[in-house]
């Protein structure tokens, strides 16, 4: 049966694992990267979206970050259309002001006879800054202290490794992106850059909310990029990875590492944040390492010239997969890499656990 004129099923209507996973959201009770620090100047506000939920992220004039529900309590305009004054966010329409808690608003109209007792408030969200990224907790604020942003010791302290974040918005469901970054059966897509070759899955296991996996594979053998890798000092013939819900990372001999942080926007849109970092790189054709003080500059060039073009291939692939799924969602699922099913089972389970928790809490509140 052709599905060209039908829409994919909802989570509740899904008939198989692939349909379910392509309709899931993500548990909001985690810290999510939402923007690069460098992209938000002091005194500015931007809109970020977590699973169809619009949030106004703003940077006060003193450089601190805050996040509020993206609506004015007066006429429901998006506060991201407004401006920042000091540590307050001001609505563009009537000048209503909100502090960083979403309360104690200054309402100009009350000064000329308005309702002086009016004390509107909107939701605020916990915000942190780490690794050059702004992190937001979109779930229940009281749970924010129970969750941790992933620890990446190599990116902290005086001897931290160089890392320049990369971020993109891809028109694909978040589960397709998780499938992509840990499924090395798509080496053909990257035959020009050769980040990995001849991959053989040697291990996979789901432990709690983590899917661990490993490949025997040739890492970093690109014609140009491979010249920077110290193959004589590093075991570049294997790689370990993990889908540490809702994050993903990889590790090559404690020398080449990366993290991926996804921000689910809706069923067909995801913001992605990549952190690639290296213990060291060498000067091509010479047995000399690039000095530590020059690594950040090298990473910026590498991001632009090699890593971003490589990731663009993934973008094209997952966006095409999204369109293909929307057109043929009822086609029989075919999957050769068994670890992909593990990713999908974990993603569905975490969404089901969140929905059950929400239902129970709502029932308790209404009792």
Image (spheres, rainbow, N blue to C red):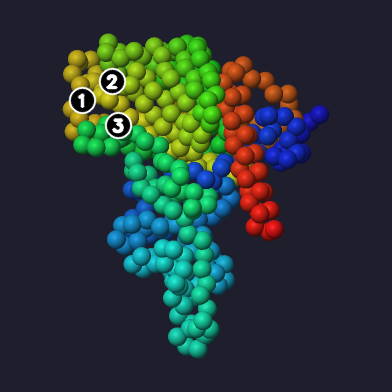
Query: Front-most of 125 and 306?
Result: 125
Q: Which quadrant would the N terminus be assigned to in this image?
A: top right
Q: Look at mark 3 in the image and give the residue it sits on.
A: 154
Residue at 27% over, 16% down: 230
Q: Where is residue 178 in the image (x, y as percent from the top left)?
A: 53, 30
Kindly state the secondary structure of the residue where label 1 is placed. Answer: loop
> Is 299 above or below relative to 60?
above
Q: Which mark is residue 228?
A: 2
Q: Which mark is residue 212?
A: none
Is residue 73 at all visible to an observer of this figure?
yes
Snapshot quadrant of residue 239? top left
Q: Badges 1 and 3: C-beta atoms under 8 Å apart? A: no
> Is 232 above or below relative to 178?
above
Kindly state the secondary structure of the residue where label 3 is placed. Answer: helix
Q: Which quadrant would the C terminus be assigned to in this image?
A: bottom right
Label 1 to label 3: alpha-carbon separation: 17 Å
Query: Front-most of 258 and 103?
Result: 103
Is residue 82 at all visible to an observer of this figure?
no
Q: Badges 2 and 1: C-beta atoms under 8 Å apart? A: yes
């Amino acid at each position: 049966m052709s599905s060209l004129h039908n829409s994919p099923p909802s989570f509740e209507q899904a008939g198989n694992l692939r349909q379910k996973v392509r309709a899931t959201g993500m548990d909001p009770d985690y810290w999510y990267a939402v923007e690069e620090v460098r992209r938000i100047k002091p005194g500015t506000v931007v809109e970020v979206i977590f699973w169809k939920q619009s949030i106004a992220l703003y940077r006060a004039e003193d450089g601190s970050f805050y996040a509020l529900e993206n609506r004015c309590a007066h006429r429901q305009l998006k506060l991201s259309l407004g401006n920042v004054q000091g540590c307050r966010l001001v609505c563009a329409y009537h000048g209503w002001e909100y502090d960083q808690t979403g309360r104690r608003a200054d309402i100009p109209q009350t000064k000329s006879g308005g309702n002086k007792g009016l004390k509107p408030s909107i939701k605020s969200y916990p915000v942190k800054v780490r690794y050059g990224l702004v992190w937001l907790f979109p779930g229940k604020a009281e749970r924010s202290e129970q969750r941790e942003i992933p620890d990446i010791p190599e990116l902290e302290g005086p001897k931290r490794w160089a890392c320049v974040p990369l971020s993109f918005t891809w028109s694909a469901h978040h589960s397709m992106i998780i499938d992509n970054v840990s499924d090395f059966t798509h080496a053909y897509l990257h035959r020009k850059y050769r980040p990995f070759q001849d991959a053989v899955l040697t291990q996979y296991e789901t432990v709690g909310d983590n899917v661990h996996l490993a490949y025997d594979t040739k890492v970093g053998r690109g014609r140009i990029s491979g010249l920077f890798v110290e193959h004589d000092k590093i075991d570049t013939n294997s790689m370990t990875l993990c889908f540490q819900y809702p994050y993903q990372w990889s590790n090559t001999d404690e020398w080449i590492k990366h993290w991926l942080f996804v921000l689910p926007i809706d069923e067909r849109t995801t913001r992605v944040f990549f952190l690639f970092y290296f213990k060291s790189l060498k000067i091509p054709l010479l047995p000399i390492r690039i000095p530590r003080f020059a690594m950040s500059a090298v990473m910026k060039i590498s991001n632009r010239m090699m890593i971003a073009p490589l990731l663009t291939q993934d973008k094209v692939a997952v966006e095409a997969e999204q369109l293909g799924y929307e057109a043929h969602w009822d086609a029989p699922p075919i999957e050769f890499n068994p670890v992909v099913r593990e990713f999908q089972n974990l993603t569905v389970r975490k969404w089901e656990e969140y929905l059950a928790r929400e239902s129970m809490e709502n029932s308790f509140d209404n009792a």
